[in-house]
Amino acid sequence: MLEKRKRGRPSTADPQANAEFAKRLDTILEEKGIIPEELAEMLKKTPAAVSAWRRGIARPSRKNMAKLKKVLDVDDI
């Protein structure tokens, strides 16, 4: 189970989970033909935030994860 930090964000301390998320995100983006800069715009996030998710440095907050699923039209990432 993920450790929780203040404000209910998932912990970014699990490198393996971050890497798995990054791989799934890249696969979905490739399948949908969306480039990271477009995703950042769609989510109203900085390209640096999306880059951190894609490199496995961090994962989105719960709020951003919900937006991400909606924008990418997927049930799970």
Image (cartoon, grey):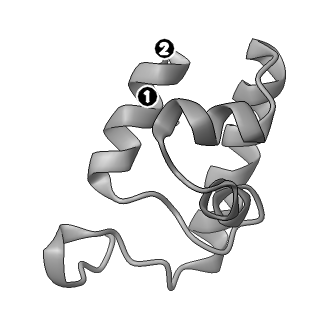
Residue beneath disc 1: 69
Report if residue 22 is visible in the image: yes
Instruction: Check the image and report above or below for 42 versus 18.
Output: above
- Is 45 or 12 nearer to us in this picture? 45
Give the quadrant of the N terminus.
bottom left
Q: Residues within 10 Å of mark 1 (few under 14, many from 20)?
A: few
Q: How many marks?
A: 2
Q: Tell me what residue is drawn at x 78 percent, y 31 percent.
A: 27
Q: Position of residue 62 (x, y in %)?
A: 29, 53
Compared across the picture, whether 67 is left or right of 49 comes to left
Compared across the picture, whether 72 is left or right of 26 comes to left
Which of the 4 image quadrants contains residue 42?
Answer: top right
Residue beneath disc 2: 73
Which of the 4 image quadrants contains residue 19?
Answer: bottom right
Tell me the CA gap for discs 2 and 1: 6 Å
Report if residue 76 is visible in the image: no
Tell me the SS state at disc 1. Answer: helix
- Is 46 or 74 nearer to us in this picture? 46
Q: Tell me what residue is drawn at x 49 percent, y 78 percent.
A: 12
Compared across the picture, whether 8 is left or right of 31 comes to left
| Residue type at tag 1 | Lys
Q: Position of residue 24 (x, y in %)?
A: 68, 40
Q: Are marks 2 and 1 in contact (CB under 8 Å)?
A: yes
- Is 69 or 21 nearer to us in this picture? 69
Instruction: Check the image and report above or below for 72 versus 12.
Output: above
Q: Residues within 10 Å of mark 2 (few under 14, many from 20)?
A: few
Compared across the picture, whether 29 is left or right of 30 comes to left
Q: Position of residue 16 (x, y in %)?
A: 65, 71
Tell me the SS state at disc 2. Answer: loop
Instruction: Check the image and report above or below for 20 versus 55.
Output: above
